[in-house]
Image (cartoon, rainbow, N blue to C red):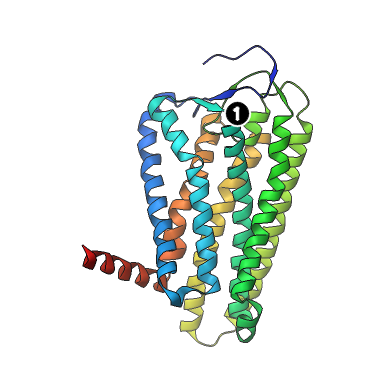
């Protein structure tokens, strides 16, 4: 792969490098990513089918879980198929429009997922701290509005980021990454990239900062309420449900923030480590979320077993 020396605006396509320094391992790594992608699709589709087929699960907690599964399917599907084509068939070229779309889906739906995780924390707070008002405060209509608000905020904030991309003049087509991550593409520009950098950092910090603070407050109030329960069994059950949710939250925020800030400030982090973690960030949480949050929930587990029995009976 060679750098293009001609300055041009909106090149016809970019060339993805993959994981610099690990090119010899691309073929083997693809099997790992393919296996994780298959598990992610299977797990999240199972959650969606179970909730859809069980009227008793048409409740706020499970509807938010369906939103989370849908977002996870979008996130991993927007990156992994192209990544597998790159690793297995050396299909490094990606059209400019496809690159911009991939960037929009990755960053936009990551912001939407952050909003859904906040809504799920609010759901748990109401269920545990305000149980008598839970039904009136969080109706199915309210769930729909919260989901729509998370989508509008996340996708709305990322639309200008994608538009700024089209206004740059590029001196190179070679993206030193496995997918079209915002700063990896912006660094190919010849001119001033400060507006892109400032907008990207500001929106990410506001979204993650606001959501994580609100989630922390929700769980502090939940913890206080749980510790006041007299029944050990009730405390254990509540900690189990909330522990699963906290696991999903940490799994989403920790590698995401590491990848985001390393791209901008982590010059001393080896590039192959950073890009490998960025790749795993978009596939590991979608793979593990149905297990951590869905399959550890008895209602989801029982529903999945009933779905399997019905499928077996029809064969």
- Look at 70% across and 15% down and name the residue there: 7
Q: Quadrant of residue 225?
A: bottom right
Q: Is residue 243 above or below residue 25?
A: below
**In the image, is 237 to the left or to the right of 132?**
left
Residue 122: where, in percent of width, then height? 63, 70
Q: Position of residue 175 (x, y in %)?
A: 58, 26
Choose between 278 and 258: the one closer to the eye. Answer: 278
Does residue 171 sit above or below 52 in this rendering? above
- Whether residue 286 is visible here, answered yes or no, is yes
- Quarter of the figure that contains the C terminus: bottom left
Residue lying at 41% horizontally and 51% vertically, measured from the top left: 41
Q: Is disc 1 placed on a helix, strand or loop?
A: helix
Which residue, given by chain and number where applicable, does mark 1 sit on?
96
Q: Position of residue 243 (x, y in %)?
A: 51, 67
Describe residue 315's horizontal placement relative to residue 166 as left or right: left
From what the image shows, is residue 195 above or below residue 154? above
**Quadrant in the rendering for residue 299:** bottom left
Which residue extends farthest front? 314
Is residue 208 visible in this depiction of the protein? no
Return the x and y of residue 213 as percentages of the image width and height. Answer: 70, 61
- Mark 1 is surrounded, within 10 Å at the Cα level, by few (under 14), some (14 to 19) or many (20 or more) other residues, namely some
Residue at 60%, 21% in the rendered image: 173
Residue drawn at x 70%, y 24% is: 189
Residue closest to the eye, 10 or 254? 10
- Residue farthest to the top, as pictured: 5
Tally of numbered tags: 1
């Amino acid at each position: 792969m060679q750098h293009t020396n001609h300055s041009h605006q909106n090149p016809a396509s970019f060339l993805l490098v993959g994981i610099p320094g690990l090119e010899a391992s691309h073929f083997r790594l693809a099997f790992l990513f393919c296996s994780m992608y298959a598990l992610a699709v299977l797990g999240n589709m199972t959650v969606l089918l179970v909730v859809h087929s069980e009227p008793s699960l048409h409740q706020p907690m499970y509807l938010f879980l369906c939103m989370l599964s849908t977002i996870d399917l979008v996130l991993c599907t927007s990156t992994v198929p192209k990544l597998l084509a790159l690793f297995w068939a050396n299909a490094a070229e990606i059209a400019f429009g496809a690159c911009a779309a991939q960037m929009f889906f990755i960053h936009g739906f990551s912001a939407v997922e952050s909003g859904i995780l906040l809504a799920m924390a609010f759901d748990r707070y109401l269920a545990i701290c305000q149980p008598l008002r839970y039904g009136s405060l969080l109706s199915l209509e309210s769930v729909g509005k919260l989901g729509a608000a998370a989508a509008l905020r996340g996708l709305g904030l990322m639309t200008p980021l994608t538009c700024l991309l089209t206004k740059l003049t590029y001196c190179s087509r070679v993206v030193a990454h496995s997918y079209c991550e915002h700063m990896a593409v912006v660094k190919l520009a010849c001119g001033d990239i400060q507006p892109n950098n400032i907008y990207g950092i500001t929106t990410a910090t506001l979204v993650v900062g606001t959501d994580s603070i609100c989630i922390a407050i929700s769980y502090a109030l939940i913890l206080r309420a749980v510790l006041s329960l007299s029944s050990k069994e009730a405390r254990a059950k509540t900690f189990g449900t909330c522990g699963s949710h906290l696991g999903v939250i940490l799994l989403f925020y920790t590698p995401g923030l590491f990848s985001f800030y390393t791209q901008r400030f982590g010059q001393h982090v080896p590039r192959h480590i950073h890009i490998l973690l960025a790749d795993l960030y978009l596939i590991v949480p979608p793979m593990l979320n149905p297990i951590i949050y869905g399959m550890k929930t008895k209602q989801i587990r029982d529903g999945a077993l009933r779905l399997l029995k019905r499928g077996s009976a029809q064969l």
